[in-house]
Amino acid sequence: MYGETARRLITEMPNRGSLDDSTHSAKAENPVCGDIIKLYLRIEEDVVRDARFECRGCPGAMAAAAGLTELVKAKSAVECRAFNLEDLEAHVGQLPRHKRHGLELAVEVLRSCLGTGER
């Protein structure tokens, strides 16, 4: 079952779309289910000024990608590098157990976008 925040993210899809003036971007794909998330960040003076995403996949991946963009905006790149699966899950809220892979994919694309390999 999807929680209230996850349902809002899936319905509204905040920050969906590309970002023409992005300074950082990355793409991550789950080869098992085919979910793809592209993340675009505009970082100025070490602060995420804007974040957008494109996602092709299940509702869990869409909620995770949208939630990630909300979570990183106005945060420093250092703070964003410290975000982990638990932080994103706390922001997105309840996802069905079999859709948690969307959270993992979103954290992976953030790490790739910021140039860190850590999860």
Image (cartoon, rainbow, N blue to C red):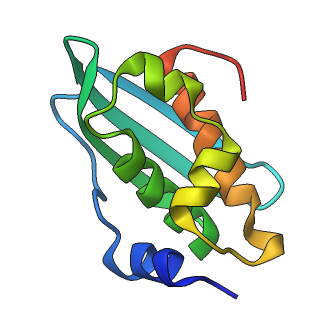
Q: Quadrant of residue 115?
A: top right
- Compared with 15, 11 (above or below) is below
Q: Nearer the viewer, residue 57 or 2?
A: 2
- Compared with 6, 111 (above or below) is above
Q: Can residue 63 be seen here? A: yes
Q: How many circles with numbers are drawn on the protein?
A: 0
Residue depicted at x 63% and y 84%? 2
Q: Quadrant of residue 46?
A: top left
From the viewer's perspective, is 24 left or right of 113?
left
Residue depicted at x 60% and y 62%? 61
Residue depicted at x 57% and y 25%? 82
Q: Nearer the viewer, residue 66 or 89?
A: 89
Image quadrant for the C terminus? top right
Residue depicted at x 40% and y 53%? 54
Q: Nearer the viewer, residue 118 or 23?
A: 118
Residue 71, percent across and down?
41, 47
From the viewer's perspective, is 96 left or right of 57?
right
Residue 76, percent across and down?
34, 22
Q: Can residue 58 be seen here? A: no
Image quadrant for the N terminus? bottom right
- Compared with 28, 11 (above or below) is below
Residue 8, percent across and down?
40, 80
From the viewer's perspective, is 85 left or right of 7?
right
Q: Nearer the viewer, residue 59 or 48?
A: 48
